[in-house]
Amino acid sequence: MFNKTNKIRVTVDKSHLFTLGEKMYRESIEFVRELVNNAYDADATDVLVLIADDKIEVADNGAGMNTKGLEQFFTIGSEEKRTHGVSPKFGRKRIGQFGIGKFSALALADEFIVESVRGKYKYTVVFSRASWKSDQSWDLPIKKEEATALDKEGTKIILNHLTKKVSLAEAEKYLRESVPLRAKKFSVYLNNKKVSARTVPGRIIPFNIKTMYGLIEGEVIVALDARDVLEPGMECRVKQVLIKRDLFGVERKYHHGLNKITGSVNADFLPLISARTDFVIDSPEYKLFYQLMQKQLESVLADLKKQSETKNFKKINQELAEVMKQIKDALILNPDFVPAGRAVTRLKRAGRAVGALAGVDLDKREIKNKNETAVKTEKSEKPEAQPEPKIQAKPLVVKKIRLKKLGISCGVVSLGEDGPEVLSQGNLIYINQDHPLYQKFYKKREQFILNLMRLITQEIVLMKKSRITAAEAFSWQSKLLQDALSK
């Protein structure tokens, strides 16, 4: 008698379905997102979403559902969209979901109604929270009736007696991100206003990459104005649905232009985690995708950097030439301030330490007068100074002042953020473009020009006389600046 086999009936408490659905769809708009995507799968061209304080309607002009279609609609984990992954009319890759959302609807509203017209018939299912939870049956009644002339093919889903209020602004933002608004022949309207994919003015760089797993396609947008980019990064989508936004690690290498980078990429082959909020990052598909997208963005940012350097060169070249001309005119008016000779090689002032830079010990700079007698006298009293090492950094641009018996050159060079703001070697003046003050004034033309004048006149005054009081230096530099700015 102990060999008899009995059967155990496996049942699921209906309340667990509500709990599971509510956890998966914490906001009403997430469920609306699923309904809009279902309309896309059903080859709808228009979806009308109406949101009121106590009611939500989502109506489409798609293929509609008959009894069999409604059974699949209410089946949890239906294989229909997986086995038929392309829509029959427009050949759309179906987005698909797990189907638990229908039960989440009853965690958001007390009543859930489905009205669908297909062919000559209209089908209606009323899903009441209270009655369904109290009824032991798992069956839902379907009402079938002949469609009238006013009944257009498609599906309308109504949520009555909402338990949570839905913000229109949040709904519009969410729909922009989570439904395929860029798809052809597909429009979504929210309270009679068309919801359009957000566009950012700028340079569009399309790409289409074939891989062993499938196609990666999209476009990188370099915004004209960084303020138009709400959040930098590429919208990564699967079947046109946003999963997350990513910069693919390029932010660790590039900084310039990063805040202007936006765009969208779609790769249907990427595996997703069950919550559909991220990719399976350890999968070979995602690793290849990440690598290819990183390379794509690096190419764009490298091009941006090159363009910026060209633009930077033109700007500095023009403005440094203007500054040097004005200073030359000021020196002509003040010949006493012109350094005594072309052979100015070193400057030395107590406390004017600037540290080692590019292998140069700049603290050891000394003054050498053109007067050979003075030099010989100094050499007889002090140990012979070692030849001054030269700065290795190549200037971005160099401009010269040519006066009788004098030639002063000024170059803009990269010496690092911690390097000196300005320094001189011989008759060469080097301005550090990496210095924080240079970067601060660079974008403001008038302040930038004034800053260049300040630095250059400061070095010219020090070339003129190695031993000079602060008051003298300030007075001479002020006179040069005044005469330069008056031109």
Image (cartoon, rainbow, N blue to C red):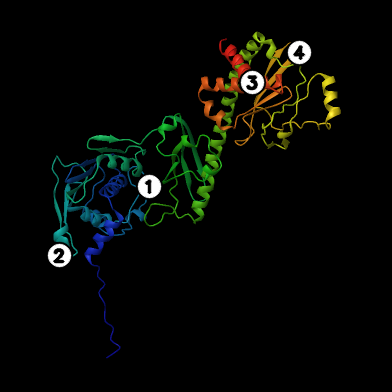
Q: Position of residue 418 (x, y in %)?
A: 61, 37
- N-terminal of the two: label 1 or label 3? 1
Residue 93: image tag? 1
The quarter holding residue 386 reads top right
Q: Would you place residue 465 above or below residue 301 in this image? A: above
Q: Is mark 4 on a helix, strand or loop?
A: loop
Q: How crowded is mark 2: few (under 14 residues within 10 Å), some or many (20 or more)?
A: few
- N-terminal of the two: label 2 or label 1? 1
Q: Would you place residue 447 above or below residue 180 in this image? A: above
Residue tagged 2: 135
Left of 125 or right of it: where is 480?
A: right
- N-terminal of the two: label 3 or label 2? 2
Labelled pair 3, 2 in contact (Cβ < 8 Å): no
Query: Real-space Cα distance between discs 3 and 4?
Result: 23 Å
Q: Is mark 2 on a helix, strand or loop?
A: loop
Q: In which quarter of the image is the C terminus?
A: top right
Q: Given the image, on which type of amino acid does mark 4 rest?
A: Lys
Residue projecting furthest to the top? 333
Q: Given the image, on which type of amino acid does mark 3 rest?
A: Ala
Residue tagged 4: 405
Q: Nearer the viewer, residue 465 or 471?
A: 471
Q: Position of residue 30 (x, y in %)?
A: 29, 49
Q: Where is residue 303 in the image (x, y as percent from the top left)?
A: 56, 33
Instruction: From the image, state whether disc 2 or disc 1 is nearer to you.
Output: 2
Q: Given the image, on which type of amino acid does mark 2 rest?
A: Asp
